[in-house]
Amino acid sequence: MAKRPNKLHVKKGDTVIVMRGKDAPTRDKNGKMVYTKGRVLKVFPEEQRALVEGVNMVKKHTRPSQDNPQGGIVEQEAPIHISNLMLEDPKTKEPTRVGYKFTEGKGGKKQKVRYAKKSGEVID
């Protein structure tokens, strides 16, 4: 029987902020936090990783092929662990934790939605 992957707090298309690693937040001259943000391109639940646009860039050596007759070194995104990402709050544009709650959905049915803990704003 296959192991069921854990539910993750990020989904494809979310805007996330990198909290750890080489793209971690830094402070500018005024002491304000500067975050690295990106859109989630793909999620790998089995490995607990996500592919984020413009984050964790690595250089890959490619062999000449029909698509790339020249070959050479290509820069591309590498998956980053989910624990190093936080969702961007839709209201404040700051990193926030994610909570789950049930709201009234279509036809009076309850629907489980994600919300930002910082502002209380519903994410999806």
Image: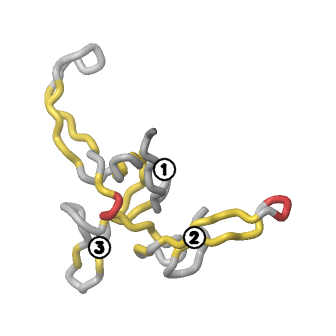
Check disc 2: other Cα within 10 Å, few if <14, some if 14-19, many if 20+.
Answer: some
Q: Is residue 5 left or right of residue 115?
A: left
- Residue 98, image x and y in percent? 49, 71
- Residue 101, image x and y in percent? 62, 72
* Secondary structure under the numbered disc 2 in the rendered image: strand
Q: Amino acid at mark 1?
A: Lys
- Residue 31, image x and y in percent? 24, 85
Which residue shows up at 14% across the image and 31% down it? 61
Closer to the camera: disc 1 or disc 3?
1
Q: Quadrant of the N terminus?
A: top left
Viewer-proximal residue, 18 or 111?
111
Q: Is residue 20 left or right of residue 49?
A: left
Which mark is first along the chain, 2 or 3? 3
- Residue 33, image x and y in percent? 29, 78
Mark seen at residue 12: 1
Check disc 1: other Cα within 10 Å, few if <14, some if 14-19, many if 20+.
Answer: few
> What residue does disc 2 label?
100
Mark seen at residue 95: none
> What residue does disc 3 label?
34
Colour style of the rendered protein structure: secondary structure
Q: Is residue 33 left or right of residue 43?
A: left
